[in-house]
Amino acid sequence: MRQMSNNQEIKKSSVWVIIVGIIFVATNLRAPLTSVGPLVGVIRDSLHLSNTLAGMITTLPLLAFALFSPFVPRLGRKFGMEFLILISVIFLMIGIILRSLSGVATLYVGTAILGLAIAICNVLLPGLIKREFPTQMGLMTGVYSISMNLFGAMASGISVPIAVSLGFGWQGALGVWGILSFVAILLWLPQMKRIKGRTTSVPNQKADGGVNLWRSALAWQVTLFMGLQSMVFYVLITWLPEILKQQGISSDQSGWLLSIMQLALLPITFIVPIIAGRMSSQRSLVTIASILLLTGTLGLLYGSLNFIVLWVILLGIGGGCAFGLSMMFFGLRTVNAHQAADLSGMAQSVGYLLAATGPTLFGYLHDVSNSWTFPLLLLVCASVLLFIFGLGAARNRQIGSLN
C-alpha cells in the first residue's frame, strides 16, 4: 500500500512538473513580440531606421513562423518534443539578448532567432498537450492560451513605462523578457529527467496517421480557420487605433480601446477550449465567434460612436473564441500527438503567412481608397469565410477517419 501511495505521489508530482513547464514556456510566446509595438517609434528614431525597416521588426517573426512551422513536426519526431522545446527556449533567450544590444544587425538577427524559437514552441505545445493530457485537453489548452495571451497583453502595457519611467530605454524594455525565458528554461529542465528512458514516439501509432495532411479537406478547413482568425487579430492589433482616430476618437482613447479589446479576449481564450473539449461538435461556438466578429466589424463601419466600447468588446470576445477553437482543433481533429503537431505546423504556417500579409494588405486598401470602409469590408468577408471553414473544422470527425 505504501509503495502504491508513493507511486501515486510521484505520478502526481510529475504531472505538476509538466503543467508548470507548459505555463512558463507559454508565457514566452507572445510577450517578446507584443513588447515591440509600443516601442517601434523609439527604436526607429534611436537607430535611424525607415518606417519600412521599423515595420520589419514586427513582420520578421511572423514570416519566421510561416516559413519554419512546416518543418518543426519532423524535428520533433527526430529529437523529441521536450528536448526541442528546451533548445528553442534557450535560443529564444539568446535572441532576446541579441535584439537588445543597440545595433541594427543584432536587432534583426536577434528578432529572427527568437521568431524561429517561438515557431517551434507554437507548433509542438498543442501536440504535447494532446499526448500528456488526452482527457483534459480543453482545460490544458485554456491554461496554455491564457498564459500566452495574459503575458502578451502585459508586455504591451509595461514596455513604455520600463523604457521611459524606469529609464531602461528600449534596450532594457526588450531585454527584460530574457529573464522570463531563463526562468522557463529552469522549469523545463526537469522534463529531461522525466522522459529519460522513455521513447519520444507514441507506441504503435504512425506519426501521421497514414494521411497526407496537405491533401486532407479537414486539415485545410482547420488551417484556413486558424489563418483567418490570425489575420483578423493582427489586422485589428495593427490598425484599430488608426481606424478609431479617423472617426474622431483621440489617440489616448484609441489606445485604451485596443487594451479593452485584448482584456475582453483573455478570459474567453481560457473558457472556450474547456467548453469545446466537452462538445462532440463545436459548430455552435464557431457560429458565435463569427457573429461576434461580424457584428463588431459592422459596428465599426456603420454603428454609433456611443457604442464603440461595445463594438470593441465584441471583437475581443469573438477573436478570443476563434483563437481558443483554433488551438483545440489541432487536438480534436487528429488521432495522435504527432499528427496534432503536423496539423499545428501546417495551420500555423498558413496562418502566420496570412497574419504577416493581412495588415499590409489592409493598409494598402486604405491608401488606395483613402477610407477605412473598403478595408473593413475585407474583415466582414473574413468573418463570413471564418464561419464557412469553421463549420467544416468543427464537425465531429478526425483526419483519416471515415466520419
Image (cartoon, rainbow, N blue to C red):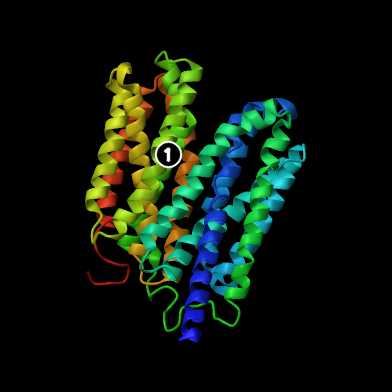
Nearer to the camera, 52 or 345: 345
Furthest toward the front, the residue is 2
- Residue 180 located left or right of residue 288: right
Say above or below: 335 vs 393: below
Nearer to the camera, 220 or 337: 337
Furthest toward the top, the residue is 248
- Residue 402 located left or right of residue 122: left
Q: Position of residue 260 (x, y in %)?
A: 42, 30
Quadrant of the image for the C terminus?
A: bottom left
Rendered image quadrant of residue 49: top right
Q: Position of residue 131 (x, y in %)?
A: 44, 70
Amino acid marked by disc 1: Phe
**Image point 69% across, 49% down: which residue?**
95
Callout 1 secondary element: helix
Q: Position of residue 223 (x, y in %)?
A: 38, 54
- Residue 337 located left or right of residue 84: left
Nearer to the camera, 269 or 43: 269
Residue 65 visible to an observer of this rendering: yes
Q: Position of residue 156 (x, y in %)?
A: 55, 35
What residue is shown with label 1?
233
**Image point 53% across, 71% down: which residue?**
14
Say above or below: 89 vs 53: below
**Image point 68% across, 48% down: which residue?**
179
**Image point 62% across, 74% down: which residue?**
193
Residue 361 visible to an observer of this rendering: no
Quadrant of the image for the N terminus?
A: bottom left
Say above or below: 17 vs 31: below
Rendered image quadrant of residue 106: top right
